[in-house]
Image (spheres, helix red, strand yellow):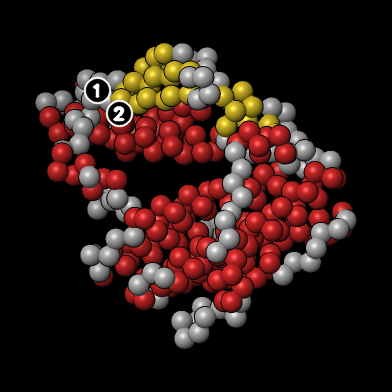
Amino acid sequence: MSLARLPRSWSQIRRLAQKECQTISLGQLLRQTNSDDASLRHNACWLREQLPIRFARRIQDILQLPHVVVSNPNIGSILETYVNTFESVSSFPDIKDSDGEQAFLRLIKRELVDHSQGTRLVAEGYREVRGLYPHIKLDDFLHDHFTTRIATRILMDNYVNMRSPRPGYVGVVRQGMRPLDIVQDTARDILDLCHSLYGCAPKVEYRGNLDCVLDYIPRHVTYMVRELLKNAFRSTIERRLARGGARSPDDLEIPKVAVELQQGDIHVVIKISDLGGGMPKHVQREAWQYGWATIG
């Protein structure tokens, strides 16, 4: 997108960006997800009204960033995709019948594909900007951007999936999801990765209420658990390797990584702990900033 001019729909973007988004809880999402024609049209009409507000607010936020950020090619690509989606959805005609709903479904599917690289583009763009201008920090913007991105994608994915019921699922939500199954599957993948990289891997000890369940989105749990387990495995192995004394990886005495699960009234707690040495106090604050990593 050229920075010499604002989007042609700028006045509409500004107007809709002032509106409040209609929030929806996971419970509401479950209750409103049905595959009958009336429910599909209702959800399509709701998305047609709400998506432009969400995209308008993000477009306005991006355009208020420093010029060096917006002019980055990756960030510019994100902005262009957001503007295109805003204009496509906001100009879509009223959905009055099944044909209109099917046309809107095709539009949403295309937009999901167009936005599939969004996280990578933002991460690469921010890294490039920080490389040139280390003093620029966009944590507040990135927090709002990614939070809204996740929520918007849930709504769009759920609309696409609600017409094809799967056993145990309501849209994208898995009813009675067992976190232990996800943790074990993820741990097996990371064990294989560690063996290929280091020649060894810690064992995993499972504690607590291993039969706990909840209604949730498996993909999100998998992502969170994978990142935490990767950190726990890596720090545990590298700390032990740094001590030396072993003739081969097979001779290492690697401490276990512990995973504890507990069932609350409306939630499940997953606690992952390790003996990887922890984090020095002088970097603990930096660790919560976007773009921070121990790998260069």
- The x and y percentages for residue 5 are 50, 84
Helix, strand or loop for disc 1: loop
Residue drawn 63% across the image and 58% down it: 51
Residue drawn 51% across the image and 52% down it: 148
Residue 103 is left or right of residue 25, and the answer is: right
Residue drawn 51% across the image and 19% down it: 265
Q: Nearer the viewer, mark 2 or mark 1?
A: 1
- The x and y percentages for residue 230 are 35, 36
Residue 170 is left or right of residue 241, and the answer is: right
For residue 214, which quarter of the picture?
A: top right
Residue drawn 35% across the image and 62% down it: 126
* Mark 1 crowd level (few <14, some 14–19, many ≥20, 10 Å Cα): many
In the image, is residue 185 above or below residue 292? above
Q: Does the CB distance between marks 2 and 1 fall below 8 Å? A: yes
Dot 1 amino acid type = Ile
| Separation of marks 2 and 1 at Cα, in angstroms | 9 Å
Q: Which mark is residue 254?
A: 1
In the image, is residue 249 above or below residue 149? above
- Chain-order first, disc 2 or disc 1: 2
- The x and y percentages for residue 235 are 25, 34
Is residue 180 among what the camera can see? no
Q: For mark 2, what is the residue?
A: 200
Helix, strand or loop for disc 2: loop
Using the image as rendered, state which of residue 19 and residue 116 is in the foreground: 19
Using the image as rendered, state which of residue 193 and residue 234 is in the foreground: 234
In the image, is residue 64 above or below residue 269? below
